[in-house]
Image (cartoon, helix red, strand yellow):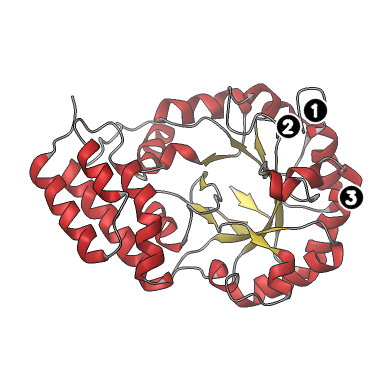
Amino acid sequence: MNIGTVTLPSPLVLAPMAGVTDLAFRTICRELGAGYTVTEMVSAKALCYQDRKTLPLLELGEGEHPAAVQLFGSDEEAMEKAAAKAAEYSGADIIDINMGCPVPKVCNNGEGSGLAREPEKAAKVAAAVIRGAGGRPVTAKIRLGWDRGHLNYLELAKRLEEAGISALTVHGRTKVQMYSGTADWNAIRKVKEALSIPVIANGDVFSPKDALDIQKRTGADGIMIGRGCFGNPWLFQQCAAALRGEPIPPRPPLAQRIDTVVRQIEMAAEQKGERIACLEARKHFAWYLKGIPYAGYYKEQISHVETLEGLHVIAKGIKRDLKDGD
């Protein structure tokens, strides 16, 4: 799959998710089969103002290519300047525009899904980012519309293609749906049929079978995985095998999975400090324990972890006391 001049080694893409897809988690997912990763979304205005909390979000891992920085905003000038800054600071191969975030504090400000309500303006923002990207391909991610009564995804998709974007990711839900209900894969297929640029399908990929089904249903060029890989980055490995028609490898034993999440948190601590990494570890570690019988005690312990030393104690106890379910 090619996005402009950039070739992806795999059609499997890790979705950009605020508070989840930091450098540490992206590193793990790349090792396990994600062919393309995207940073957490970055505020264009904050980047222009050189906010100290924003720059670390742009950092890519050693060898993390191809990869994209995702920007959000609705001001053309700010988005153009932010694209230039992001490209220079991060060395990203691609600049992606968030036009799908459903969080009220973003979309109610005319950004994310709010920007997508105005296809003409969204196209102008895309053109501004292309001007600032320094020749790098520019992509966008959208939803189907604000709600079921306002499904403007085809008009938006066509305008973005006309503006010059190199690929489009479509999440098969509306803004109002958030993450509820079922993703509309048939709508994604309509986008694929309407555009000549690559289309990446997103929504409800939780298993290798889902990856096969969404590709068949949509005809999409790529598959973006989001919530399905929470605590299960091995899903990329499994989906890759399924797409190649190979046997699906099982997830590794629980002890190995625990070693993986500990390594992930240790990497996060190197980047953002032990305190922040341990606070974020509380949700990540709990995701890795999903479906494990009798894990309640350790989930409670994790919800209070404050140090890496405490994390190691909990990990040791889990490997000693718990086993995979049937």
- Among numbered discs 2 and 1, the one appearing first in the sequence: 2
Please say whether residue 267 is visible from this viewpoint: yes
**Disc 3 designates what residue?**
121
Quarter of the picture containing the C terminus is: top left
**Disc 2 designates what residue?**
144
Type of amino acid at the residue the image marks with label 3: Lys
Q: Nearer the viewer, residue 86 or 296?
A: 296
Residue 109, percent across and down? 79, 51
Residue 172 lies in quadrant: top right
Structural crowding at the residue carrying mark 3, measured as other residues with C-alpha within 10 Å and reported as few (<14), some (14–19) or many (≥20): some
Name which residue lies at 28% across and 40% down.
Answer: 289
- Mark 2 touches mark 3? (CB < 8 Å): no
Residue 166, percent across and down? 73, 52
- Mark 2 touches mark 1? (CB < 8 Å): yes
Q: CA distance from mark 2 to mark 1?
A: 6 Å
Structural crowding at the residue carrying mark 1, measured as other residues with C-alpha within 10 Å and reported as few (<14), some (14–19) or many (≥20): some
Name which residue lies at 40% across and 61% down.
Answer: 24
Q: Is residue 8 above or below residue 308?
A: above
**Disc 1 designates what residue?**
151
User: Is 319 placed left or right of 79 in the picture?
Assistant: left
Tally of marks = 3
Name which residue lies at 58% across and 27% down.
Answer: 180
Residue 48 lies in quadrant: bottom right
